[in-house]
Image (cartoon, helix red, strand yellow):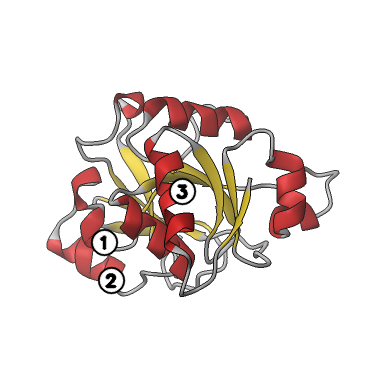
Amino acid sequence: MLITLYPKNNARHDIDRIVEVLNGGGVIIYPTDTTYAIGCHALKERAIERVCKIKGIDIKKHLLSVVASDISHISEYIRIDNATFHMMRSYLPGPFTFILPAGNRLPKIFKNRKEVGIRIPDNPITHEICEALGAPLLSTSLKVDANEDIEYMKTPELIDEKYGDKVDLIIDGGEGGTEYSTVISYMDGDLRIVRHGKGAIEAEE
């Protein structure tokens, strides 16, 4: 199912439908400030397993991101001190993924994971979904295979054509981007760029 959302003034029943799907363990595709992403309720383990299956990744090896509308909404999922909090406020919301020490409230599926990715996209649709859900999303970016047209990554109708039978909802937020977020590791106070992407930051690599 394809639902169209806008930066503001969305119909309440559309937002309620998305929240219902996520609370029921469903998987959605939604826009961010970088690419479209596959997401689910961050505390629904079977939904997380579905996300990994759809993308073809191993949760034990692949970094997934917790996506929220505000830093305060994810503080219980990571171990964060005042210095880290203020550093993140300098860059978020924005096209960055911060790798931080994992907290204790993540699902059991993350057992023994020492780190987790954190995303707060600068996108009003993502913000509205997280606010209405009252919980973060567990998310991973869409990707395009080497032999695929890039349009399948950024055009909602084509995303629906490829993934419509694999997910529960696809949110049309307009044409998406093709540049991934900049990934920054901030473990033990050491700032290091893991992947250059859309976000610009100065750090030692």
> Which label lies toward us, 2 or 1?
1
Q: Is residue 15 left or right of residue 82?
A: right
Measure the C-alpha gap from mark 2 to mark 1.
Answer: 8 Å
Q: Residue shown at 26%/52% (left/top)?
A: 74
Mark found first going from the N terminus, 3 or 1: 3
Residue 201 image offset from top left, x and y in percent: 45, 72
Q: Residue shown at 45%/70% (left/top)?
A: 124
Measure the C-alpha gap from mark 3 to mark 2.
Answer: 31 Å
The residue that mark 2 highlights is 89
The residue that mark 1 highlights is 71
The residue that mark 3 highlights is 17
Q: What kind of element bears circle 2?
A: helix
Three-letter amino acid code of the residue under disc 1: Ile
Three-letter amino acid code of the residue under disc 2: Arg
Q: Determine contact: label 2, label 1, CB under 8 Å.
A: yes
Q: What kind of element bears circle 3?
A: helix
Mark found first going from the N terminus, 3 or 2: 3
> Which label lies toward us, 3 or 2?
3
Q: Determine contact: label 3, label 1, CB under 8 Å.
A: no
- Quarter occupied by the N terminus: top right
